[in-house]
Image (cartoon, rainbow, N blue to C red):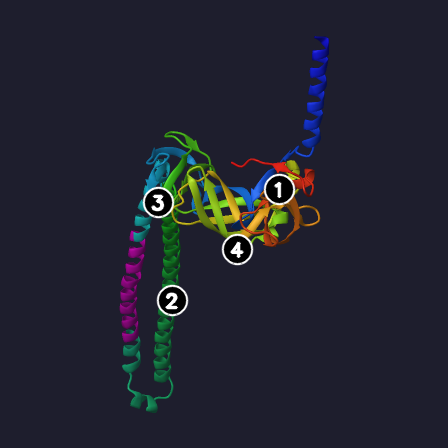
Amino acid sequence: MRKVILLLSVLAVIAAGWFLYFNKGEARTVVGVYEVDYGDLANTLEFSGEVVCTNMYSVMSETGGTVLNIYVSEGSRVKAGDKLFDLDSSAMEAQLQEAQLKLEALSEAAAQTVMAPRAQDTRMSRQQQAAIALALSQTTGYDFDAFNEALGGVGAEAAAAAAAAGQRLSELAALQNATAAADSSNALSTESQLKLAQLAVDQLQEAIDKMKFTSRIGGTVLAVNVHDGEVLAPGMPAMVIADTDSTEIVGYVYEKDVDGLQVGMDVIIMTEGGNYTGKLTKIGSAAMDVGELSMFDTMTKVTIKPDEGFSKMPGAVVDLKVVLSAKNGVLNIPADCLTADGCVYVVDDKDIVRKRRVTTGFMDMFNVEVTSGLTRGERVVMAPDSVQEGQHVSYNRG
């Protein structure tokens, strides 16, 4: 019995040796393979951006005051000129009423001042006429023929009468000029007061108008920061109004990537609701410091204008992709299929790898164009560092 067991053991060892001897070259390495095909290659720049309104402003007061009426709420749609809110202007309205009464009184006084010189001119004209008549009567009442025969006395009296009349005329003219000057001075004073009163009315009306706020643009009320009865401080935003139908996207790219960008480039806008397209409309002319956020310490602002159909609200963050360079419909393989010496390992029909040199062209971040050395449908080993020429391999054929 022992001999039988010993014989069987020897035969088993011999059989195992023969199996290992004839199958020692059949051990196969499992590899990943890629089937060569045509496709599109592209180098892209990806970053994030925020949706902002192109037309947006904060409603603020220059003077401040107590909020009296609010006509809108957050989310309200408004047109240019629609009422937003009022500040209490009752004190200024009382001042305006007083200023208007003063203006009316000065206007009446000015009208009376204009009429008074006319009456005075009439009175002075009559006095002048009387003086002239008197002077003429005193001079023309003498016989000038007799004067030629007289020896002095009569001529002296006539000359004295004429001189007296001239003196009266000079005095009357001086009186008239003085009266006219006084009237002119009074008229100028009244005119100045009238202008000042009108200016006060205009300024008060302007101040009251500034306490009634209307929308400068058509759009949506994004924020309301005041309530009835609250005191609004000067320069504090009471509301934010924006035209939400006109938006753009603002993003930042690293300074090292700016050279690859050009205004007018197509941009893919990626959102959870789908992808949209847009155009790169502006590239910033200065870089900003981002500190320790990245190994690249500066970034540049870029602006993208979405095409029609984009409807994200202001403040939303979206992903952006800019195609820097591309080549479509080319035979390509993953870049990690290439060896350091520019070859690939092709798996033949017997699952044996064969090393082959290829010529490459355009490259993107992951793939490379093959211009010669491969044909569509051939299988190449991915990451071939662990394989050798002539080696049997196995791979997933699914």
Badge nearest the viewer, 1 or 4:
1
Measure the alpha-carbon separation of dots 4 and 2: 79 Å
Q: Residues within 10 Å of mark 4 (few under 14, many from 20)?
A: few
User: On the rendered image, what quadrant is the N terminus found in?
Assistant: top right
Badge nearest the viewer, 2 or 3:
3
Measure the alpha-carbon separation of dots 2 and 3: 36 Å
Measure the alpha-carbon separation of dots 1 and 2: 119 Å
The x and y percentages for residue 353 are 64, 43
Picture quadrant of residue 204: top left
Helix, strand or loop at disc 1?
Answer: strand
Q: What numbered label is drawn on residue 381?
A: 1
Whether residue 48 appears in this view of the structure is: yes
Which residue is the site of mark 4? 263
Helix, strand or loop at disc 3?
Answer: helix
Q: Amino acid at mark 4?
A: Val
Badge nearest the viewer, 1 or 3:
1
Q: In the image, which residues are magenta?
A: 108-133
Position of 185 relative to 24 (above/below): below
Q: What numbered label is drawn on residue 177?
A: 2
Magenta-drawn stretch, dominant element (helix, strand or loop)? helix
Q: What numbered label is drawn on residue 99?
A: 3
Upstream in sequence: badge 1 or badge 4: 4
Q: Is residue 131 left or right of residue 292?
A: left
The answer to which of 114 and 328 lies nearer the viewer is: 328
Upstream in sequence: badge 1 or badge 3: 3
x 35%, y 66%: residue: 176
Badge nearest the viewer, 4 or 2:
4
